[in-house]
Amino acid sequence: MTAESTNSGTSLYKTDARTKRRNASEARFRIYGMAAVGFGVLALIVLLTSVLGTGLGAFRQTFLTMPVALDAATLDKKGNRDPAEMAKVTTIGYQKILEKALIAELTEQKLIPEGMSAKDVGGLISKEAPAQLRNKVLANPELVGQTITFRALANGRIDGYFKGRVTMESAALDSNVSPAQLELADKMRAANLLGLSFNWGFIFDPDASELRPEAAGLGVAILGSLYMMIIVLVLSLPLGVAASIYLEEFAPTNRWTDLIEVNIANLAAVPSIVFGILGLAVFINFANMPQSSPLVGGLVLTLMTLPTIIIATRAALKAVPPSIKDAALGVGASKTQTVFHHVLPLAMPGILTGTIIGLAQALGETAPLLLIGMVAFVRDYPGAPPEGFLDPASALPVQVYNFTQRADPAFIERASGAIIVLLVFLLTMNILAIILRRRFERRW
Amino acid sequence: MNDMTLTERALEATEIKFAARDVQVYYGTSHAIKDVNIDILDKTVTAFIGPSGCGKSTFLRCLNRMNDTIDVCRVEGDILLDGEDIYDKKVDPVQLRAKVGMVFQKPNPFPKSIYDNVAYGPKIHGLTRNKAELDEVVESSLRKAALWNEVKDRLDSPGTGLSGGQQQRLCIARAVATSPEVLLMDEPCSALDPIATAQVEELIDELRGNFSVVIVTHSMQQAARVSQRTAFFHLGNLVELGDTTQIFTNPKDPRTESYITGRIG
């Protein structure tokens, strides 16, 4: 008798038809899964490349650097260096000074092309630059009479030329810039009078008008978003956690609590613009709170975030093993002691994760803010809290929307740049959520 | 001298700690405990035995009102602790549970340090005035639970890091730290290996000197080893209650006999 003959027809070395089918279906499922993951990763890569590709340019800006003689005769006629008196000189006066300084510098370096008018040369400088110079002088009147080195923003078209947005061909058709100006800009760059450097103004400066894309920044929007996040956190975390603890640990199960539960779940699914209409009707029209203010924005976003936080918190509370509750009750802890000494600390990682996810959602929310006036053009920074909560402000996602609505192509780059800033904030918050969760979990 | 202590014990042992009269428990519409009348004596170990679902754990949880946490559960009848009805409206279950401690089936230490686990009860009940007293209570409780020598050098390490048997003894230490008068144990050894079980059983025997102990168990051997009195539950009824020796050697009810000989259960 050989070894083979003892096998009664079925050998372990041979896969039977049924097993083959099962293996095939498993292999198919793996392929589906991998395809789904691959598609997601691909979409993310495409998104990031497109945003980073267009947006990174916003973080670099073209500046002209030149000595500027601050002529006392024009800027301070009375000679007493009184800022109130000096404020009578408008940006037009400063524009002339800048123009003169640029022409003087170019003449010295023998760069001025034949037949180019002073106005065309001055056109290289951004219209925002005189205002910045004026602010600088008014802040420090002692500068008058001196010659300072001033870094002036270049016109948006010139900036676009160095970023590839504007070409000689497009400039020939453009009434705002001429090929001759671009040639001059090239020469100035070679002479180190003009160059690109990191654009802090994009992060800290307020928004600028349609004609000055080079000066537009996110300062007001970032501050507005920050204020709103503070309001959302301060209101929605305690309210949400208190509501969840009551519903999960104290409330009797009856028709009312069922109704409340269903409604909370429904609220989480309500389109955000509906909250905007609610905010407009209740907070602005009824309660007469100021429009465009971070307070109203924060309140609306709080309403929107609450259901998310409540649902996450309840899930976290539910996940605490009942044996821990039994143990606490068993040694004679009251219900409140049980919740606050044992259940809540154990649920904390989940609560924090839910809260930060809710905040991140609120940070990226645009629609409700449009309705309560945060879409307005705001150039003044809101004041310090708490009064600042009532000042008009913008918000990051609304600023993105605003930038995309403007005609000048330079704003495309700004919009993507703002998206990058927004994504960085969201990423930071998510990392914070992970760190907090780890911290709380690692304790035991 | 020896004889005198024995007589004293015997006298004490006849004091009734818990008296239950016509107790009914309902879970929604199902009638889980029917007409239970039982006296539980002080400084005695009483074992509740019976097949799964017979209501012994349910009845045990009535004794410190742990069933209050279950919404659909309803208790009728009287349960008297030292003559006071524990289901009276004036009774706060929190105070009751300080007097009637409980050890659960699965070891459930808090995810805190060993010290904090034991100190929690005394802290919330304000039993100690200062840290030194609290330290003392923690040490004596851990000694009573025969755990002190194993953990005295690592009181700050998490209670959840101990072995299963140590965790259960920690839970016992936690329960005795509030100096209860009665200790309820719901199958305290079901998650333990034989060695840990033996340690816990030894402990129960020692605890009898100070407390009245009620233990629910699935193991008849365990009931026979640790208890002086045994109650047999079946389908929600208290079938028979008597001295452990009598129940196991000379049961009066045929159902008890069937159960202890292994024919039902």
Image (spheres, helix red, strand yellow):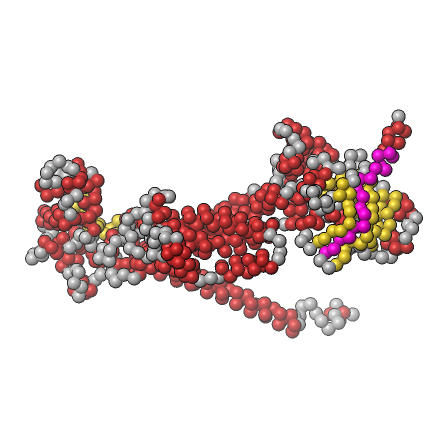
Magenta segment, prevailing SS (helix, strand or loop):
strand
Task: Locate the N terminus of chain A and report the quarter of the image it occupies.
Answer: bottom right
| Relative depth, front residue between A263 and B195 | A263
Left or right of A128: which side holds B61?
right
Give the answer, above or below, for where A11 lies relative to B186: below
Horizontal and vertical percent position of residue A114: 7, 56
- Residue at 87% x, 34% y: name it: B10
Horizontal and vertical percent position of residue A70: 13, 42
Task: Locate the C terminus of chain A and report the quarter of the image it occupies.
Answer: top right
As for residue B24 lying within the magenta part, the answer is: yes
As for residue A142 lying within the magenta part, the answer is: no
Question: Which residues are the magenta region?
Answer: B10-27
Give the answer, above or below, for where A379 lies relative to A13: above
Left or right of B189: which side holds B242?
right
Horizontal and vertical percent position of residue A405: 29, 62
Residue A160 occupies quadrant: bottom left
**Which residue is most to the left?**
A115
- Residue at 9% x, 53% y: name it: A118
